[in-house]
Image (cartoon, helix red, strand yellow):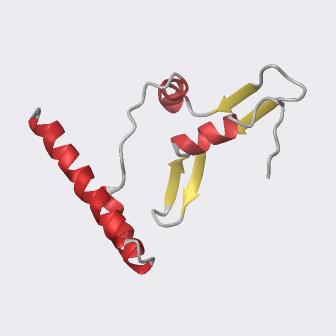
Amino acid sequence: MNLPAHTVIIKGTQIYNPEKGRWTELGALDVLQMLGRAGRPQYDTKGEGILITNHSELQYYLSLLNQQLPVESQMVSKLADVLNSELVLGKSNGGIKFIMLHNLYKLFHRKKWSF
């Protein structure tokens, strides 16, 4: 559902995680997705986002908004699931080729080999 608004207010950045049994910070992508709703293209030239969080998390969110946090792949942790889904869908050739090329790239990049 597309519900843009002129101003988006995120009141609190912690959510309860039942798997961990404690409160955890919202993920970076979740925050960016919510703030991305600010601004109505047909009415506004800009939108406003207000983020209310703990002072201890302030630097993290400022870095997030200034895009100074590294992006890290999580594929390795889900590799078994990816391979299984490729096999079940009958697309194993493409998936296996992708993983081989991905690993070769990482190997060459790590060793700094060139051709």
The residue lying at 68 percent from left, 35 percent from top is 36
Q: Position of residue 25 (x, y in %)?
A: 52, 45
Q: Residue furthest bottom?
A: 88
The residue lying at 50 percent from left, 58 percent from top is 22
Hey, which quadrant is residue 87 in on the image?
Answer: bottom left
86 to the left or right of 12:
left
58 to the left or right of 10:
left
Quadrant (top left, top right, bottom left, bottom right) of the C terminus: top left
Between 11 and 67, the residue placed more toward the observer is 67
Q: Position of residue 113 (x, y in %)?
A: 9, 35
The residue lying at 78 percent from left, 21 percent from top is 46
Q: Residue furthest right?
A: 43
Hey, which quadrant is residue 81 in on the image?
Answer: bottom left
The residue lying at 59 percent from left, 52 percent from top is 15
Q: Position of residue 51 (x, y in %)?
A: 66, 31
Between 103 and 29, the residue placed more toward the observer is 103
Relative to 86, residue 13 above or below? above
Hey, which quadrant is residue 40 in on the image?
Answer: top right
Relative to 94, residue 66 above or below? above
Relative to 94, residue 37 above or below? above
Q: Position of residue 85 (x, y in %)?
A: 42, 73
